[in-house]
């Protein structure tokens, strides 16, 4: 399958009326999509009851001057595992660069070294922290894309880092020229 058919670097937007309520109005930053499956990090819903400074303390890291940012619900898979989506001005040995048609979009790191760097003030300039991820097996996402459920929007660091969490879903559709209020919540057959 040619790389053009893979969706790495896209923002996966849940369509209105998606059957799985866990993904209602969700935006998932697709970090990996190839013949082996896909991995994305949810960026549109915040976790209740935990914020960054508390998470750092749980990991025995001094939060220093780090802002007490929200922790995002990255997805239903491994909900206790942390990921940081960040600008490409920092990288650790396990950092994955996410590339789109115009070049580097963002990076993903799933190891504690990025949290340590953020806490010490030497981390990436832009970042967001999530617990859990969304994952698809081989061919699963491709199959889901043929049914009413997902829309693949262009990857956008501005939506990822500069748009408030609760506005990302609407903003990503608007960036594609789509008013999501006009979308039907179910598909029909012609």
Image (cartoon, rainbow, N blue to C red):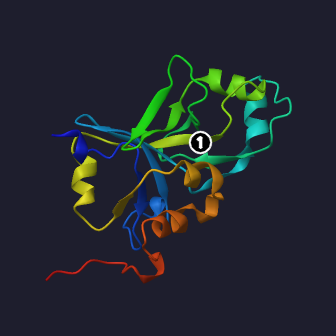
Q: Quadrant of the C terminus?
A: bottom left
Q: Is 90 located above or below residue 130 in the figure?
A: above
Q: Residue 113 sits in which quadrant?
A: top right
Crowding around mark 1 (Cα neighbors within 10 Å: few <14, some 14 to 19, many 20+) is: many
Relative placement, left or right, of 10 versus 37 is right
Relative placement, left or right, of 174 versus 183 is right
Residue 46 in the image: state x and y as whole percent: 64, 53
Of 21 and 26, nearer the camera is 26
Q: Quadrant of the N terminus?
A: top left
Q: Is mark 1 on a helix, strand or loop?
A: strand
Residue drawn where x is 79% and y is 43% of the image = 68
Q: Is 176 located above or below residue 49 in the figure?
A: below
Residue 117 in the image: state x and y as whole percent: 70, 23
Count the numbered circles shown.
1
Q: Residue 58 sits in which quadrant?
A: top right
Relative placement, left or right, of 25 versus 150 is right
Residue drawn where x is 52% and y is 41% of the image = 132
Residue 133 in the image: state x and y as whole percent: 48, 42
Disc 1 designates what residue?
A: 130
Relative placement, left or right, of 37 versus 127 is left
Residue at the farthest right position: 65
């Amino acid at each position: 399958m040619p790389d053009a058919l893979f969706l790495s670097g896209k923002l996966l937007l849940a369509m209105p009326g998606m059957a799985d309520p866990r993904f209602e109005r969700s935006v998932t930053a697709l970090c990996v999509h190839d013949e082996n499956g896909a991995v994305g990090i949810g960026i549109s819903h915040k976790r209740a009851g935990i914020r960054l400074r508390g998470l750092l303390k749980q990991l025995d890291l001094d939060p220093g001057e780090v802002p007490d940012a929200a922790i995002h619900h990255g997805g239903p898979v491994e909900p206790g595992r942390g990921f940081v989506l960040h600008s490409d001005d920092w990288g650790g040995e396990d950092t994955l660069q996410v590339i789109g048609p115009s070049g580097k979009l963002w990076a993903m790191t799933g190891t504690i070294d990025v949290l340590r760097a953020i806490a010490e003030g030497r981390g990436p300039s832009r970042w967001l922290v999530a617990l859990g991820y969304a994952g698809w097996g081989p061919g699963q996402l491709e199959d889901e894309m043929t049914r009413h459920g997902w829309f693949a929007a262009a990857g956008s660091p501005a939506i990822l880092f500069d748009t408030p969490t609760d506005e990302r879903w609407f903003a990503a559709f608007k960036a594609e020229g789509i008013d999501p209020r006009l979308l039907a919540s179910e598909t029909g057959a012609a």
